[in-house]
Image (spheres, rainbow, N blue to C red):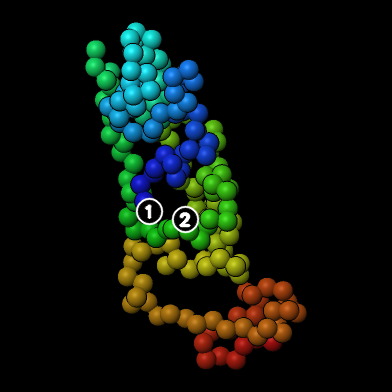
Amino acid sequence: MAPVRFADHCAACHSDKLEFDKRILDSVPHDTPEVIHATILKAAPASGQLIADLEQVLWKDKCAYCHTMNDAAGQLPKVASSAIPRRWMFHANFSHAPHSMFVCQSCHTNASTSKSEADVLLPAVAACQKCHRPGDAANATCSECHSYHDWKSQKKEQITFDASCLLEKGKVESCKSPTGAQPQK
């Protein structure tokens, strides 16, 4: 999974966090304090106490909403490195791509109420199992998500079913047959 990026993952809901004083600049870039400061000075070269005060509001109210800011007296703050891993579960396979038709909150139910960057918003397995369950459209095999075991050495069972059975009984589970067996009717 790619690292979280403001433009890709946050801006849709939190673009207000980059707003600045409209008399000077509509918004600042999501970048380092040095780049943000240079952008502000470029828009308002005759800086002074007003700019310094506005920047303090920016660092404390806007940037600190998501980032841990370490203030150094008389200097630009330092942004603490985030500890967001690229991959949360090392023995699991997951891609957001096949799930892109869903809104984020359908799986990440606490995202809209999260108040801290320390919140880990991984869905519980029960959320996955709403779609990934036997007989449903989404694959429900263990190896769909888990790579802890060497699934290549496992015997793959090919399941077949009769379409007329499916139409009659309405559930895939009622009509499955292992490979080599005659499909149930």
Q: Please report the residue visible at 43 percent of the width from the left and 80 percent of the height from the top.
A: 156
Rendering coords of residue 50 (x, y %): 38, 10
Position of the C terminus by quadrant: bottom right
Residue situated in front as seen by the camera: 145 or 26: 26
Above or below for 95 versus 120: below
Residue 119 appears in the rendering = yes
Q: Amino acid at mark 1?
A: Met
| Residue 1: image tag | 1
Residue 33 appears in the rendering = no
Identify the image quadrant of residue 163: bottom right
| Contact (Cβ within 8 Å) of mark 1 with mark 2 | yes
Position of residue 106 in the picture relative to residue 17 (left or right): right
Identify the image quadrant of residue 129: bottom right
Q: Amino acid at mark 2?
A: His
**Helix, strand or loop status at disc 2:** loop
| Residue 96: image tag | 2
